[in-house]
Amino acid sequence: MLTKLLTGTTAGLLLLSAGLGLALDTEVRNHEAKKQQLLVAQASLAAYQVNVKELLVKQLAIDLKSKNIQSKFSATTRNLEALKNRESVILKRRGLIEIKINKAFNKQQKRLACITGELELC
């Protein structure tokens, strides 16, 4: 009877250890899967952080350009306001205005030629 009891207990212990081993194996596999998911998430996060930094740099560049454009616009507006009451002078000296326009056009044409690589005007 004692052998039957020991045999039954041994068999029970073997079943219990097999069940625990199976549960442990399942936990290890789940852990490995979670670890792999975490690595993928970390890589995605790193790429996202790089993209955010690039966007911030671009935003700063756009803000700087915007400020430059606004300051040029303000200067042009002030210049126009200063010239607002000089219509009679401009009408009397049309040739002077034509010369200024031609000079400005030639200057822009030379600048464009230099940018595009045409060396004749540059």
Image: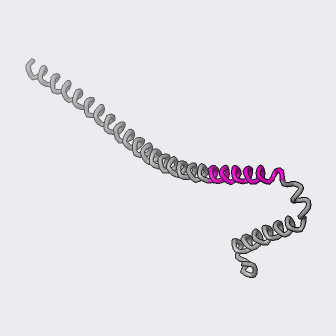
Relative to 77, does residue 15 appear above or below in the rendering? above
Residue at 33% across, 35% down: 26
Q: Position of residue 71 (x, y in %)?
A: 65, 51
Residue at 64% across, 50% down: 66
> In the visual, does 119 lie left or right of 30?
right
The residue lying toward the viewer, choosing from 12 and 102, is 102
Relative to 8, does residue 54 appear above or below in the rendering? below
Q: Position of residue 105 (x, y in %)?
A: 80, 68
Quadrant in the rendering for residue 35: top left
> In the visual, does 34 lie left or right of 100?
left
Relative to 93, does residue 13 appear above or below in the rendering? above
Q: Position of residue 108 (x, y in %)?
A: 76, 68
Q: Which residues are magenta?
A: 65-85
Relative to 114, does residue 89 appear above or below in the rendering? above
Q: Is residue 71 magenta?
A: yes
The residue lying toward the viewer, choosing from 88 and 67, is 88
Colour theme: one colour
Q: Quadrant of the N terminus?
A: top left
Q: Position of residue 33 (x, y in %)?
A: 39, 40
Q: Quadrant of the C terminus?
A: bottom right
Counting the numbered discs, the total is: 0
> In the visual, does 47 lie left or right of 12?
right
Extreme residue in the bottom direction: 120
Residue at 44% across, 43% down: 41
Q: Is residue 38 magenta?
A: no
Extreme residue in the top direction: 1
Provide the major secondary structure of the magenta segment.
Answer: helix
Quadrant in the rendering for residue 100: bottom right
Residue at 80% across, 54% down: 83
The residue lying toward the viewer, choosing from 76 and 115, is 76
